[in-house]
Image: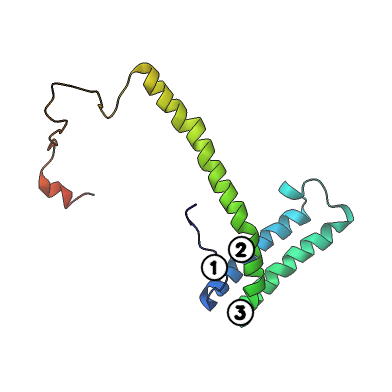
């Protein structure tokens, strides 16, 4: 399997500082939806609502505080979230690509096959000396230097 994403377990201070600000938004969002019991917390947290919302708010505040004062303190949160998110990302990426292939590319290919459409013009011609096709020059060469 090819390695598409590098799991960075030793980030530099700039990355950890940036992570702290991103975590402020992410954990702040989780605290808000936990407090109002929306989306994934829609099942109702009952008496745990202030504790769960407070936990996420505390994580958001600590992450941004660490980002300002000492970015290396964000390392455990960063590594923990990276280790949890990495396999989720691999599974979802492969799942999405599989769904796109089997629900989009395959039906289009089958439709082309059934209707006899051949976009690449790959028909076998035994009398042809070569299958080379000359390119068509529809526009002047200067237009390539002014594309927009």
Residue 146 at x, y = what percent?
18, 51
Q: Residue furthest right?
A: 47
Alpha carbons under labels 3 and 1: distance apart: 14 Å
Q: Tag 2, which secondary structure?
A: helix
Task: Give the image location of residue 6, x and y in percent.
Answer: 51, 63
Q: Is disc 2 surrounded by few (<14), some (14 to 19) or many (20+) residues within 10 Å? A: some
Q: Quadrant of residue 8?
A: bottom right
For residue 25, say whether it is visible. Answer: no
Discs 3, 1 touching: Cβ within 8 Å? no
Which of the numbered marks, if any, corresponds to residue 8?
1
Comparing labels 2 and 3, the label whose residue is closer to the camera: 2
Q: Are marks 1 and 2 in contact (CB under 8 Å)?
A: yes
**Nearest the eye: 11 or 122:** 122
From what the image shows, is residue 90 above or below residue 52?
A: above
Rounded to the nearest angstrom, the CA distance separating label 2 from label 3 is: 15 Å
**Mark 1 residue crowding within 10 angstroms, few (<14) / some (14–19) / many (20+):** few
Earlier sequence position, callout 3 versus callout 1: 1
Pinpoint residue 45: horizontal percent, then vertical percent: 84, 52
Q: Is residue 132 left or right of residue 148?
A: left
**Residue at image coords 58%, 53%:** 89
Q: Which residue is mark 3?
A: 72
Which of discs 3 and 1 lies nearer the camera? The answer is 1
| Relative height, residue 112 to residue 34 (above, below) | above
List the residue tagged with mark 2: 82
Residue under the image location 39 percent in, 17 percent down: 114
Residue 147 appears in view? yes
The residue lying at 68 percent from left, 62 percent from top is 28
Query: Could you tell which of marks 2 and 3 lies nearer the N-terminus?
Result: 3
* Foreground pick, 126 / 123: 126
């Amino acid at each position: 399997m090819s390695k598409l994403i590098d799991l960075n377990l030793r980030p530099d201070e700039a990355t950890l500082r940036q992570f702290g600000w991103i975590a402020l938004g992410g954990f702040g969002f989780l605290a808000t939806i936990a407090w109002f019991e929306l989306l994934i917390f829609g099942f109702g947290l009952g008496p745990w609502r202030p504790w769960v919302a407070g936990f996420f708010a505390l994580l958001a505040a600590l992450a941004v505080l660490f980002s300002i004062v000492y970015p290396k303190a964000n390392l455990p949160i960063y590594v923990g979230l990276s280790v949890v998110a990495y396999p989720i990302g691999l599974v979802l990426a492969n799942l999405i690509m599989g769904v796109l292939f089997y629900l989009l590319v395959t039906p289009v290919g089958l439709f082309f096959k059934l209707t006899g459409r051949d976009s690449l013009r790959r028909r076998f011609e035994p009398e042809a000396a070569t299958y080379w096709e000359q390119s068509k020059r529809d526009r002047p060469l200067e237009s390539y230097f002014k594309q927009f």
